[in-house]
Amino acid sequence: MITERSVASRLFNGLNIILLVVIMLLCLAPVWYTLSISLSDKAAAAAGQVFLWPKGITLGSYATIMEDSQFFQSFWISVQRVVYGAGIAFFIILLMAYPLSKNAKEFKPRNVIMWLLVFAMLFNGGLVPWYLTMQSLGMINNIWGLVLGGGLPVFNVILVMNYLRNMPKEMEESAMIDGAGPWRILFSICLPLSVPVLATILVFTIVYHWNEFFQALVLMNKSDLYPLQSYIKQVAVVIDPTTMDAETVKQMSVLSNQTLNAAKIFISMLPLLVIYPFLQKYFVKGITLGSVKG
């Protein structure tokens, strides 16, 4: 027997499905549009004739990228930045979040450090002091400037800290009775049980290091040291041709090819599109459990 409640429930579920499908299509639209532009003829793209389907389908833009050594060099720099940056941030976040997950009686400097972290998350010293600091540390034209220049991701520390605070205290107490110290507890108990939140911060860190472009424009004096996003940003900038000689205008006309830039952008999106599905199952659980306590 169909009741009014069951009808309302089915209607509600149906509307939710429709809404989620619309949101999904809206999220996929920019990716599909970029792919369509990259596969289209240069003239059709410049004329604004490409929308949902490529016009004059060609792989010319991707063939041009295969001959662009700077693109692959920048791609490799981005890969190194992600590996180094994610690895270092992952280790530091874990080491900082574990003691901060204790109360003030167990770890006396806890409240002071938390206030300093929150203050650093809300305020910064500005671009010029940051640049001067990086310069004094020898981080100019150095990939370590890109790896370490973002500082400590405080928000990720807070997520992991709150996740660890929600873990049963009895497990640590049992381990301490058996003679385990803080390092053994951290890596043998806390680390295996923290996979959801650690996978979440890993996604955040990878996306940050892969997509960030501004730091390289400030710290790198040579374009061949740019990571991928900085390289794409550089060639996509609109420059007044009246200020350049004929040879430079010719080069920039090639670099500013809309279809070529779309192909570069699409290729730059592929690594994240490949990685995310493997970590997505941990994402919502990690965010939820890491946000319960303050």
Image: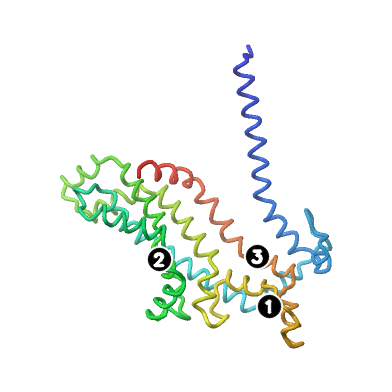
Q: Nearer the viewer, mark 2 or mark 3?
A: 2
In 3D space, how far apart are the residues under numbered discs 3 and 1 (Cα atoms)? Answer: 16 Å
Q: Please name the amino acid that badge 3 sits on.
A: Ile
- The one nearer the camera, 213 or 75, is 213
Name the residue tied to disc 3.
Answer: 265
Q: Position of residue 170 (x, y in %)?
A: 23, 39
**Does dot 1 land on a helix, a strand or a loop?**
loop
Name the residue tied to disc 2.
Answer: 151
Choose top left, top right, bottom left or bottom right for residue 217.
bottom right
Q: Please name the amino acid that badge 2 sits on.
A: Gly
**Sooner in the amino-acid sequence: mark 3 or mark 1:** 1
In the rendered view, does 115 fall on the left or right side of 268? left
In the rendered view, does 60 fall on the left or right side of 200? right
Q: Nearer the viewer, mark 3 or mark 1?
A: 3
Can you say which quadrant of the picture contains the C terminus?
top left
Residue drawn at x 63%, y 24% is 10
**Sooner in the amino-acid sequence: mark 2 or mark 3:** 2
**Sooner in the amino-acid sequence: mark 2 or mark 1:** 1
Q: Please name the amino acid that badge 1 sits on.
A: Glu
Q: Position of residue 125 (x, y in %)?
A: 41, 68
Q: What's the coloring here?
A: rainbow
Residue drawn at x 69%, y 51% is 29
**Does dot 2 land on a helix, a strand or a loop?**
loop
In 3D space, how far apart are the residues under numbered discs 2 and 3 (Cα atoms)? Answer: 26 Å
Name the residue tied to disc 1.
Answer: 67
Residue drawn at x 66%, y 68% is 264
Q: Is residue 219 above or below residue 115?
A: below
Residue drawn at x 45%, y 79% is 142
